[in-house]
């Protein structure tokens, strides 16, 4: 039985100049470089009760990072040697893995920048990646999130009867703390007979200053505030609903 959690987070920002846009991308790239992502994934491994077999990391040029951690359950990993001067390590997969990839990008015209991080936690056996969900949400403090959880394959009980899921679940929200649920609008789309669970989240609060990079509301006119607010809300709604939306007249 394989259990996979896909966690996609989005952070939105508005920059007024090309230089500020470059500075924001550089800031995000530094905040979520391979070393920081490795630290987050190490904590995920500890939370779900797995053990690390090996780690592969990569920082990309001009921006973006990837980390893959190979994990096992229930037994100690083999001894490995790590070469700190080697920027990339490749290893064989035991039976489970955790990966993260980052994607900083921006709108070519409108000043809106969007940072996305994709995390996949895939486990076999009794451990569940859902146990680390609250930690992941708190680690990124995202504006929007897309959460997918699916169970594949089967295991058998001691009588030989097949089990296609070994834990009670009717929504990913069952594993999200109430204080986090209170912060987000959430929509579920679940296919129970296929053990497929999907939850989309969008932050309820909207403080415009939280979305500005290197300037504040006090630095711009009312007309600019209204224009930028419309652009940011459109970006968030398009990500949340997964489709391009027409400009409001």
Image (tube, rainbow, N blue to C red):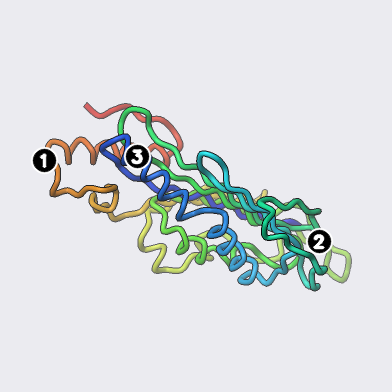
Is 145 in front, or is 151? Answer: 145
Q: Quadrant of the N terminus?
A: bottom right
Residue at image position (23%, 41%) is: 229
- Looking at the picture, how far across and down is residue 26, in whole percent? 42, 46
Q: Secondary structure at mark 2?
A: strand
Q: Is residue 187 visible?
A: no
Name the residue tied to disc 2: 155
Among the two numbered marks 3 and 2 on one chain, the one whose residue lies closer to the N terminus: 3
- Looking at the picture, how far across and down is residue 117, in whole percent? 51, 49
Crowd rating for badge 3 (residues with CA inside 10 Å; few <14, some 14–19, many 20+) = many
- Looking at the picture, how far across and down is residue 189, in whole percent? 52, 47
Name the residue tied to disc 1: 222
**Residue 240 occupies which quadrant of the picture?**
top left
- Looking at the picture, how far across and down is residue 4, in whole percent? 66, 54
Residue at image position (50%, 49%) is: 146
Name the residue tied to disc 3: 21
Residue at image position (69%, 53%) is: 86
Q: Nearer the viewer, mark 3 or mark 2?
A: 3
Q: Quadrant of the C terminus?
A: top left
Q: Secondary structure at mark 1?
A: helix
Among the two numbered marks 3 and 1 on one chain, the one whose residue lies closer to the N terminus: 3
Position of 73 with respect to 4 (left or right) is: right
Alpha-carbon distance for marks 3 and 1?
Answer: 22 Å
Crowd rating for badge 2 (residues with CA inside 10 Å; few <14, some 14–19, many 20+) = some
Alpha-carbon distance for marks 2 and 1?
Answer: 61 Å
Residue 14, compared with residue 137, is above or below; it is above
Q: Secondary structure at mark 3?
A: helix
């Amino acid at each position: 039985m394989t259990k996979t959690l896909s966690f996609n987070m989005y952070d939105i920002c508005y920059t007024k100049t090309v230089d500020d846009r470059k500075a924001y991308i550089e800031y995000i790239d530094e905040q979520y470089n391979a070393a920081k992502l490795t630290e987050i994934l190490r904590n995920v491994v500890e939370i779900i009760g797995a053990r690390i077999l090996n780690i592969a990391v990569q920082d990309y040029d001009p921006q973006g990072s990837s980390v893959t951690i190979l994990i096992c359950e229930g037994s100690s990993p083999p001894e490995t040697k790590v070469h700190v001067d080697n920027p990339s390590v490749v290893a064989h997969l035991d039976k489970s893995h955790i990966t993260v990839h980052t994607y900083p990008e921006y709108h070519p015209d409108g000043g809106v920048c969007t940072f996305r991080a994709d995390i996949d936690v895939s486990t076999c056996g009794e451990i569940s990646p859902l146990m680390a969900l609250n930690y992941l949400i708190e680690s990124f403090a995202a504006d929007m999130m897309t959460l997918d959880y699916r169970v594949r394959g089967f295991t058998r009980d001691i009588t030989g009867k097949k089990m296609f899921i070994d834990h009670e679940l009717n929504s990913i929200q069952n594993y999200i703390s109430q204080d986090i649920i209170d912060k987000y609008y959430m929509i579920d789309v679940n296919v129970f007979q296929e053990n497929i669970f999907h939850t989309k989240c969008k932050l309820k609060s909207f403080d415009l200053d939280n979305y500005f990079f290197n300037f504040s509301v006090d630095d711009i006119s009312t007309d600019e505030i209204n224009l930028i607010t419309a652009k940011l809300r459109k970006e968030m709604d398009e990500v949340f609903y997964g489709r391009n939306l027409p400009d409001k007249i």
